[in-house]
Amino acid sequence: MAYNLLKGKRGIITGALDENSIAWKVAEKAVEEGATIVLTNAPIAMRMGEIRKLAEKTNAQIIPADATSTEELSQLFLQSQEILGGKIDFLLHSIGMSVNIRKNISYTESNYDYFLKGIDVSALSFHKMMSVARKLDAMNEWGSIVALTYMAAQRTYPFYTDMADIKAMLESIARSFGYHYGLEKKVRVNTVSQSPTKTTAGTGIKGFGDFFDYANAIAPLGNATAEDCANYCITLFSDLTKMVTMQNLFHDGGYSSTGVSMEVMTKLGVE
Ligand SMILES: NC(=O)c1ccc[n+]([C@@H]2O[C@H](COP(=O)([O-])OP(=O)(O)OC[C@H]3O[C@@H](n4cnc5c(N)ncnc54)[C@H](O)[C@@H]3O)[C@@H](O)[C@H]2O)c1
C-alpha cells in the first residue's frame, strides 16, 4: 500500500548491490511513494549487472561513484540534479565494507591499512557525501539524509571487529554534520540502527547465521527485515518527521531494549 509520502521528491540511493540489499528495497519503496531517484554504487558493483534490473524497475539512471572519492561524489550530485531537475530532497548512505572482516582477521589482530580502508569506505564517505552536497548547495531545505548502522557501535559484538568502531564514527558524523547542516540549511541527518539482515555485507560476517537467530530470539517483535527498514527510511525521508535530526534510531523489533527473553532463557535450560 502506498501513501504518496515522497510525492515530487528527488533522491539519491547508494549501495543497492542485489535484491537482498537494504538499499534495493529503499529504492523500490521510494519510487512507490512517488519519488524520482538516481541510483549509485562503486564502479566495481556496477559490473555485476544486478543494479540495472533495479534501474529499469524504478525508472532510474545509474551514476557510478566510488564513495571515497570527493571528485566522483561531486559528479554524482551535479549529474543527479540535472537528471532529476532540481535539488535533492533525500539521500541514503547504505555503504559498508571491512577488509579485516572479509579476510577473517580478529579485532585484536586488525591490519591497520585495512582498518583505514574500512573507515574511509564506511564512515568518512558519509562525511564526504555531505560535505560535497553542502559545497554544491545540492540539498533542498528540510531535506533528509539517512545512513545505516548497527548496534555494535554501542555494545560489543566480538565478530563485528573493526566495523564496530567504524559505525561509532559514522553515528558521530551524523550528529556533528547534522548540527551544521541543520543550522545552515535545515537539512536533517540521522542514522538507522538496523537488525541483522541477510545481505551480502551481513552474511559476510563470521557466525552471522547464529547471531541472526539469537537477535530474533531476543527481540519481542523479531528481527526487522530489509523491507521493514526501507519503510522506516521512507518515513524519515518524508515531511512527517521533519523535526527529527542528529539521532541514532534503533530499528530492531525491540532488541536494543531487551536484556534477555524467555525464549533464550528456555533455550539455555534456565529454570
Ligand atoms: N546486513 C546487516 O545485517 C546490516 C545491519 C545493520 C546495518 N547494516 C548496514 O546497511 C548498509 C547496507 O548494507 P547491506 O546489508 O544492504 O549490504 P550490501 O552488501 O547489499 O550493501 C553494501 C553496499 O556498499 C557498497 N560499497 C562498498 N564499497 C563502496 C564504495 N567504495 N563506494 C560506493 N559503494 C560501496 C557495495 O557495493 C554494496 O552495494 C551498510 O552500511 C551496513 O553496514 C547492515
Image (cartoon, rainbow, N blue to C red):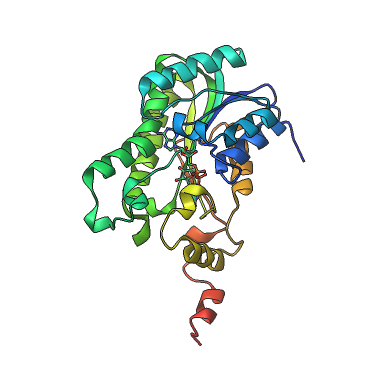
Residue 107 falls in image quadrant? bottom left
| Residue occupying the point 70% across, 25% down | 7
Left or right of 152 in this view: 63: right
Question: Which residue is at 52% across, 79% downward?
Answer: 267
Q: From where the camera sits, is residue 240 visible? A: no
- Up-down relation of residue 214 to residue 11 (above or below): below
> Which residue is pictured at 55% across the width and 37% down the height?
16
Q: Residue at x 39, y 15 (%)?
A: 135
Q: Position of residue 98 (x, y in %)?
A: 36, 46
Q: Nearer the viewer, residue 75 or 252?
A: 75
Q: Is residue 78 left or right of residue 126?
A: right
Camera-nearest residue between 239 and 209: 209
Whether residue 89 can be seen here = yes
Q: Nearer the viewer, residue 212 or 103?
A: 103
Q: Tell me the quarter of the picture where residue 132 sits.
A: top left
Q: Position of residue 8 (x, y in %)?
A: 68, 21
- Residue 234: percent from left, percent from top: 62, 37
In the displayed structure, would residue 235 be above or below residue 104? above
